[in-house]
Image: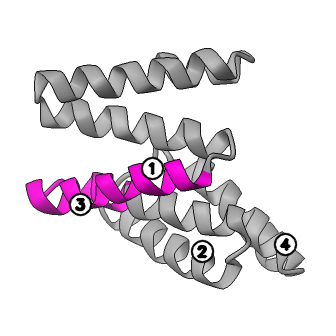
Amino acid sequence: MSALRLWLTGWPEQAIDHAVRAQARAEMLAHMLSLMVALTSSAQIRLLRGECTAAFAVAQRLIDLGQEYDFVLYETMGMMFQGSVWVQDGALDRGLALLTAALARYRRLGSAASAPFFLTVLAQAHLQRGQVEEGLVV
């Protein structure tokens, strides 16, 4: 969580450093839940920094590990990050489709903590498509 705190307080280089170190530490400990949390933080920081290729790769790892270990929540988080990357990269149709489906799944799981972040991405995607009303609804 220190990575996100650093990002939000204006320290982007330190934020990515903390995210990378947290991921490495979780890998070393081989503690799957810690790794999932670290990957989630890393994907978010990389997305915020505009590092789409890296964010997509981390999101894919979340999806793969989520499927392997039956961590549906983190698999879904990975899907939301991938949809967000596609939106940021300009693949709006693909990004909107995945992000919408993943957000619905996220809500069905009873999760809400990260919804505002991804709803913002979804609203921005609608705005980029000129769908102002749809974006306002989101």
Front tag of 3 and 2: 3
Mark 3 and 4 residues: CB-CB less than 8 Å, in contact?
no
Q: Is residue 2 above or below residue 98?
A: above
Task: Give the quadrant of residue 105.
Answer: bottom left
Disc 2 residue type (three-letter): Gly
Front tag of 2 and 1: 2
Mark sitting earlier along the chain (3/1): 3
Q: Is residue 122 left or right of residue 20?
A: right
Distance in Å between CA atoms under marks 4 and 1:
25 Å
Disc 4 residue type (three-letter): Gln
Distance in Å between CA atoms under marks 2 and 4:
12 Å
Residue positioned 67% across, 39% down in the render = 49
Residue 72 in view, yes or no: yes
Image coords of residue 87 (percent x, y): 67, 68
Which residue is identified by label 4? Answer: 128
Image coords of residue 1 (percent x, y): 45, 22
Front tag of 3 and 4: 3
Mark 3 and 1 residues: CB-CB less than 8 Å, in contact?
no
Image coords of residue 70 (percent x, y): 12, 58
Secondary structure beneath disc 3?
helix
Disc 3 residue type (three-letter): Asp
Packing grade of label 1 (10 A; few <14, some 14-19, many >=20) is: few
Q: Which mark is residue 112?
A: 1
Mark 2 and 4 residues: CB-CB less than 8 Å, in contact?
no
Which residue is identified by label 2? Answer: 95
- The answer to which of 129 and 28 lies nearer the viewer is 28
Q: Which span of residues is magenta-colored?
A: 52-77
